[in-house]
Amino acid sequence: MTYVPEKEYEINPQTIALVAKQEDGGQVFTEVMETDEHFFIPKCPRDIIDRSCPILQAASKGVSPVQNN
C-alpha cells in the first residue's frame, strides 16, 4: 500500500475509481485507482469529488451550476 500524505488529488482521465476506506482508528481515507497507479490519500472520496468537479458539487447541494440572466 502506498500512502500519499497531503496530496491534492484531482480526478483525471486516468482515474478508474475512488474507494472509501476506514482505518481501525476511524479515520476515513481514499483508495485511488488509476490506469497505471494505485495509492491512498487521507481524505474522504467526497472531498476529492467536490474539489475536482465543482459543477457536481453545486448540483449535489441543490444549486444550479448554470445561472440564467
Image (tube, rainbow, N blue to C red):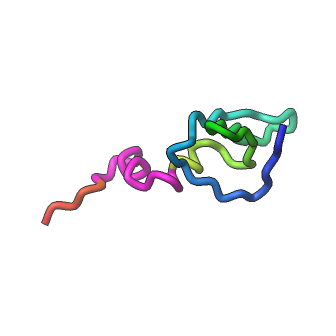
In percent of width and height, residue 37 lies at: 70, 41
Q: Who's the residue at 75% across and 42% down the image?
A: 39
Residue 57 included in the magenta stretch of the image: yes
Please say if 61 is above or below 23. Answer: below
Quadrant of the image containing the N terminus: top right
Left or right of 54, for residue 9? right
Region rendered in magenta = 50-64
Q: Give the quadrant of the C terminus.
A: bottom left
Residue pictured at 15% horizontal, 61% vertical:
68
Q: Nearer the viewer, residue 40 or 65?
A: 40
**Residue 10 percent coordinates (x, y):** 57, 53
- The structure residue drawn at horizontal position 75% and vertical position 48%, both measured from the top left corner, is 42
Q: Is residue 67 above or below residue 25?
A: below
Answer with left or right where residue 63 lies relative to residue 14.
left
Q: Main secondary structure of the magenta part?
A: helix
Q: Would residue 56 be found to the left or right of residue 42 on screen?
A: left
The image quarter containing residue 17 is top right
Along the line of sight, the residue nearer the viewer: 66 or 17: 17
